[in-house]
Amino acid sequence: MPYAKIIGSGGYLPPRIVTNDELAAELATRQIETSDSWIVERTGIRQRHLADAGVSTSQLATRAAQAALDDAGVAAADLDLIIVATSTPDFVFPSTACLVQAKLGAKGGAAFDVQAVCSGFVYALSTADAFIRAGRARTALVIGAEVFSSILDWNDRSTCVLFGDGAGAVVLKASDEPGIMAAQLHADGSQMKILCAAGNVSHGEVVGDPFLRMDGQAVFKLAVTSLAKSAIDVCAEAGVSLADVDWLVPHQANVRIINFLGRRLGIPDEKIVVTVDRHANTSAASVPLAFDVARKDGRIKPGDTVMMQGVGGGFTWGSVLLRI
Ligand SMILES: CC(C)(COP(=O)(O)OP(=O)(O)OC[C@H]1O[C@@H](n2cnc3c(N)ncnc32)[C@H](O)[C@@H]1OP(=O)(O)O)[C@@H](O)C(=O)NCCC(=O)NCCS
């Protein structure tokens, strides 16, 4: 049975950077108080990239996808599977993956979206791995992409300071060598209310609340416990010890969640990739963006063992353990 191996990666961030001070000044014009020190102390976030009005998820996704294809030396025409993880699709349908396929100039392979919010990339990666291992695809493109700013309530300081926009992508190829060694996906729908955007478009109108709502403290606690257990379980499945993990690439929601997780697993800071300070939480894009940064700057190298972890609305969480 072939393994799915990452042979290229790419990322794209919209060019407009908004620092905490700039965001605080903008919110102050509407009598909403926040500060760089509050945001940095509670989250580690210093800035975020925000898409301009009219820029869609498929546009960001296509830029990241093209970078990953170039990095892998793969032509779009050779893709037999495209999966986009997103909670901010361009349309109700067609899927963002179909839009990306057309923008890349590809045709004929399977293309669909995965909706698992901030766990979306890990869900999509595990799905592509299953396709490749089953022999149903040989070359796959997996993208996490979001214009999360479009579902934020910019009058709610407890959420709007936390998120950003962006896209990250990897190209997977069937290989005799690992590759993805193990993957675990989980959900607990009974916790849907602690992180949701519970609105919809129906009969031509927005029904319900289209903005992201969150119980920050409940999310914090569940994120740390679920990710810690998932890390232990995915290592056990692969027969790899936690000490053998060269790089942890966790979902980039909050540096305090990442620090707690590292301490609970005994993984030192030097082995943990952190981009939340520069990118904020880009939901499904956060893991592939962080992975691409660490791969391109030479930290993640061929032969390394990498654990990617996602956690978010649903409530969903999961881990993928792989060899580069
Ligand atoms: C959101 C989070 C940073 C809030 O930190 P916290 O320590 O739990 O803070 P609280 O929600 O208890 O709020 C403390 C105070 O700060 C205030 N506050 C909230 N947002 C603020 C902001 N942006 N600026 C200034 N003050 C703010 C609150 O109103 C509250 O004030 P009060 O004590 O007068 O009522 C934290 O809960 C968290 O990181 N949770 C996880 C969120 C996450 O990662 N979500 C995505 C997962 S995919």
Image (cartoon, rainbow, N blue to C red):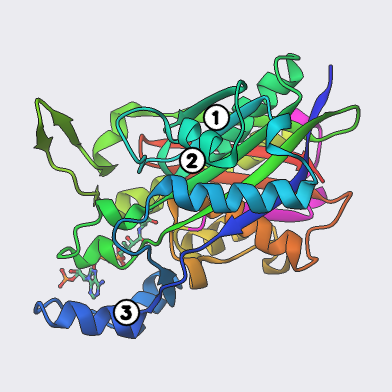
In the image: residue 59, left or right of residue 77: left
In the image: residue 249, left or right of residue 88: right
Query: In the image, which is nearer the foreground, mark 1 or mark 2?
Result: 2
Q: Quadrant of ligand 1?
A: bottom left
- Nearest the camera: 220 or 213? 213
Residue 183 visible in the snapshot? yes
Secondary structure type for disc 3: helix
- The amino acid beneath tag 3 is Trp
Q: Position of residue 240 (x, y in %)?
A: 81, 38
- The amino acid beneath tag 1 is Leu
Q: CA distance from mark 2 to mark 3?
A: 26 Å
Question: Residue visible at 57% across and 38% down?
Answer: 122
Secondary structure type for disc 2: helix
- The image's mark for residue 38 is 3
- The image's mark for residue 119 is 2
Query: In the image, which is nearer the foreground, mark 2 or mark 3?
Result: 2
Query: Which residues are drawn in magenta?
Result: 237-252
Q: Residues within 10 Å of mark 2 (few under 14, many from 20)?
A: many
Question: Residue visible at 40% across and 78% down?
Answer: 40
For marks 1 and 3 on the same chain, the one whose residue lies earlier in the sequence: 3
Q: Position of residue 323 (x, y in %)?
A: 82, 42
In the image: residue 168, left or right of residue 5: left
- The image's mark for residue 185 is 1
- Nearest the camera: 70 or 117? 70
- Marks 1,2: beta carbons within 8 A: yes
Residue 25 lies in the magenta-colored region:
no
- The amino acid beneath tag 2 is Ser
Question: Residue visible at 78% across and 46% down?
Answer: 72
